[in-house]
Image (cartoon, rainbow, N blue to C red):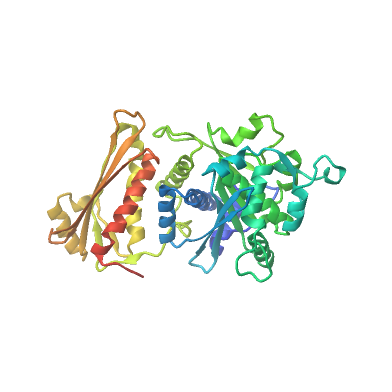
Amino acid sequence: MRRMRLRRSFLSMDLFLLCLALFFCACLPLKVNAAEEEVSKGSEQELELTASLVSLASYSDELSLLARSWLTETGWHFDSHQQLTSAADGRYHLVTKELTDGHKALLLAFPGTENLRDAKVDLRTKAVPFGGTTPKEFSKIAQGDRSAEAYASYPLVHKGFDDYTMTALFQTPVAGNQEGRTMGELLADELRLHSDEILILTGHSLGGAAATLTAARLSDMGVQPEQLCVITFGAPAVGDERFARRYEHKMQLTRVVMDGDPVAAALQSLGTRYVQFGTKERWQQNRSSARFEHEMVVYLDDALRSYLDLKLSGAMAGSAGNLLVGTPKRAAGEIFVAPLQIHMDPLLAEDSSYAQMMLEDSWQGKYSSCRLASATDGKSLTELCQNAQQAGSRYVVQQVMTTQRLREEEYNFRVILETAVYDTKGNLLAAESKSTTASRMTPLEAVLYLQFLTLQDVDTVFGVQNT
């Protein structure tokens, strides 16, 4: 089982009580029954999938912006910021969602390396002293001579990563704040004032390094360890042994590392003194994809599979869904979704059940009045329309998903999703055919990508309105 340590959850109170079995950071193991453990595992997988989606959405390419649009549709709000200095181009996203129980989920996400300035940050491997309790002290200490006696007791961190973190959160006052406080200070104020709140810090690669250093800075500003949950994907080490020992108990850090990802150990392989800490989770890329192991889409693919595995096993029932489900829309009548037709390349055959679940869940998650046809409802359009009428439905939907291996590329596929919408008399109301290759994403992610675009287009057919 993947492990994460967390004392208090930003999830609803019932989830919080169940998540204690997995997330509580006490020294002694807790005894839980099998049902509680499965619920905790489901909540953990949902949190990891949410963090991976937000980490992908923190980038600025087309696929990431689409992920951001999907998260926005499910109730997440992105407050994006960019701060420019001569040292770095600091970017971060405050990502929030009002949960159904009145609680608020709060994530702070950082993108990974996207441009030349980011690459220069990565290569600025010089070690600088790390300490202080205010932004002014942070800057002063980082500029100190680490060989001088006055700075001998301070841990050392990667200068480029610290420059990025300071630029993003701890140097520029927030616009409109009359006291001239930075976003880092405002976050620390909020967390100190509300000790039951938890901040989830996440990011991929450089973004994961910034998330770790931000948590350390907030800790030095008085935020309690149980309020700082850090989930990183393929992140390099940020500091030396002294830094690791000083902060390993001041945050709940989970480092997700894909087998074969060279970046997570890049600084150590260069002979630097930087070391990793926290709880390490080792993931493995699915055989249907042969992408570079460091890509964020590879991490997202694995998180998605783990989440779906639990749903297929039935372990997710009643345990999760608060983070990844939005407010369904009300159509002008019930939608009757015919059994899906899925034609997978043999290499992707194991993904058929995943694809079916994702497509079916997306219909029921998007529309409040949606019925999934059973195998006994027939396959012909005439049979489906008759059964839809008997069920009181107004629309009939048929979907066919096909994957075709590209001859010139052994591990690349074209994914095709065809959708037809009829009324119960068999009249065609809309037809959509969308396709993409798995050149920018994994095949499983391509299915979600095409379904998201399809549902955007058919909205008008159903005359939907928000409930």
Q: Nearer the viewer, residue 16 or 263?
A: 263
Q: Residue at x 53, y 50 (%)?
A: 44
Residue placed farthest to the right in the image? 149
Mark yes or no: residue 32 visible: no
Residue 342 x, y percent position in the rendering: 27, 42
Residue 8 x, y percent position in the rendering: 62, 58
Mark yes or no: residue 351 visible: yes
Q: Residue at x 32, y 51 (%)?
A: 451
Question: Viewed as shown, does residue 167 lie left or right of 109?
Answer: right
Task: Place residue 437 in its image quadrant.
Answer: top left
The answer to whether 391 is drawn above or below residue 401 in the figure is below
Residue 415 x, y percent position in the rendering: 30, 41
Task: Place residue 75 in its image quadrant.
Answer: bottom left
Q: Nearer the viewer, residue 316 or 46?
A: 46
The answer to whether 261 is drawn above or below residue 400 in the figure is above
Q: How many marks?
A: 0
Residue 106 x, y percent position in the rendering: 56, 60
The answer to whether 412 is drawn above or below residue 181 in the figure is above
User: Where's the N terminus, which quadrant?
Assistant: top right
Task: Place residue 466 in its image quadrant.
Answer: bottom left
Q: Nearer the viewer, residue 25 or 440?
A: 440
Question: Viewed as shown, does residue 5 lie left or right of 467?
Answer: right
User: Where's the C terminus, which quadrant?
Assistant: bottom left
Q: Residue at x 69, y 33 (%)?
A: 272
The answer to whether 14 is drawn above or below residue 408 in the figure is below
